[in-house]
Amino acid sequence: MKFFLTHLLLLASFVVNAQNETNLLNSYNYRTKGYLGVDVNGGLSSGNQKTTLQKKSNTTYISLFIAGFLGGLLALLTPCVFPMIPMTVSFFTKQSKTKAAGIRNAIIYSISIIIIYILLGLGVTLIFGADAMNNLATNVWFNLAFFVL
């Protein structure tokens, strides 16, 4: 469950930040190339060459996705998640009269959690900006209050 949620949130952040990344790359190309395509350093640059920033950006997204995927797999093995897997499965199988009803209830439960977290993440990102959750997570006062709670 957490595995899929992690990956869907990662995908949602890619969608939200795609426009910002495109604007960053376009402004970078505009600043490094003159009006006629002449490189600031004095050389002519062809329009089909990718800049170093564009190549690094694509590599960063791929490595970020792979790291998020592996992090989701590792999250399944943490002591707070791993014991919950059989408990959740047994909850849905014992509660339902048939196996099909249990699977249906589990899928509805899973999709509901995914949708709730995506909507919360997108809402916070759209209202407060892409780095709002990072700022909150690294805020010492918020973390101390969360610890006390």
Image: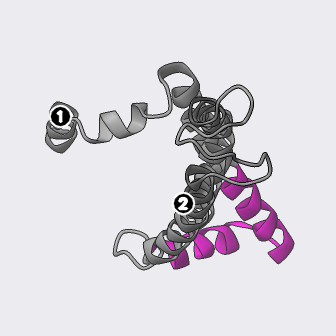
Q: Is residue 100 above or below residue 120?
A: below
Q: Which residues are magenta?
A: 84-111
Q: Position of residue 67 (x, y in %)?
A: 50, 69
140 left or right of 106 in image: left
Q: Secondary structure at mark 2?
A: helix
Q: Looking at numbered disc 2 in the image, what kind of residue is underneath it?
A: Thr
Q: Which residue is mark 1?
A: 145
Residue 92 lies in quadrant: bottom right
Q: Tell me, yes or no, whether the highlighted magenta stretch contains residue 79.
A: no
Is residue 19 shown left or right of residue 99?
Answer: left
Query: Which residue in the protein does label 2 denote?
Result: 60
| The one of 54 and 5 positioned closer to us in this rendering | 54
The spot of residue 23 in percent (x, y) is 64, 31
Name the spot of residue 146 as percent of width and height, x first: 22, 39
> Which residue is depicted at the point 71% across and 63% down?
106
Q: Residues within 10 Å of mark 1 (few under 14, many from 20)?
A: few
- Classify 102 as above or below 112: below
Residue at the image position 63 percent from the left and 58 percent from the top: 58
- Classify 8 as above or below 39: below
Q: Position of residue 47 (x, y in %)?
A: 78, 45
Residue 149 is left or right of residue 8, and the answer is left
5 up-or-down from 97: above or below: above
Q: Amino acid at mark 1?
A: Ala
Crowding near the residue tagged with mark 2, few <14, some 14–19, many ≥20 C-alpha atoms within 10 Å: few
- The CA distance from mark 2 to mark 1 is 34 Å
Work out whether residue 98 or residue 124 is closer to the camera in this orientation and state it: 124
Q: Is residue 92 magenta?
A: yes
Question: Residue reaching furthest front?
Answer: 42
